[in-house]
Image (spheres, rainbow, N blue to C red):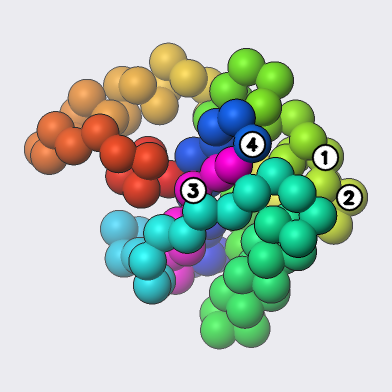
Amino acid sequence: MKPVIGIDVAKGKSVVQCFLKRNRPVGRAETILHTPKGFERLKSLLIELEQQSGFKPQIILEPTGHYHRVLVQYLQREAFEVILVNPLQAQRARRTGLRKVKTDESDA
């Protein structure tokens, strides 16, 4: 399985969670700012995950208004695979979970 990075996008920042295997997070969720320094931190997380797994990670996020655009543009410029999840599908997936927890970390 390719490693996955789930991102919960908000205004000016995002919460990032890395996964090497399904439902097995790697480390803790991390908040990155939508700044050049924050994007460089995200890139280093992606490279680190690629080195651990041997595969380039997929990035999955839910489009949030216009806040996701600058992040997606950066990731595509850096040649990472970005998958945008339809907000209705994401909502259904959250509802099917056994745990009814709503946090940025669980969304990521």
The mark found on residue 77 in the picture is 2
Question: Residue at label 3?
Answer: 15
Q: CB under 8 Å between callouts 2 and 1?
A: yes
Amino acid type assigned to the residue bearing label 2 in the image: Arg
Q: Secondary structure at mark 3?
A: strand
Q: Quadrant of residue 102?
A: top left
Q: Residues within 10 Å of mark 2 (few under 14, many from 20)?
A: few
* Lateral position of residue 94 relative to residue 83, left or right: left
Task: State how far apart marks 2 and 3 are (Cα).
Answer: 20 Å
Question: Residue at label 4?
Answer: 12
Amino acid type assigned to the residue bearing label 1 in the image: Gln
Query: In the rendered image of this protein, does residue 55 appear above or below residue 88?
Result: below
Q: Secondary structure at mark 2?
A: helix
Q: Earlier in the sequence, mark 1 or mark 3?
A: 3
Is residue 19 rendered magenta in the image? Answer: yes
Question: Residue at label 1?
Answer: 73
Q: CB under 8 Å between callouts 1 and 3?
A: no
Q: Which residues are magenta?
A: 13-20
* Lateral position of residue 65 relative to residue 2, left or right: right
Residue 5 place in picture, x, y as percent: 53, 56
Amino acid type assigned to the residue bearing label 3 in the image: Val
Q: Main secondary structure of the magenta part?
A: strand
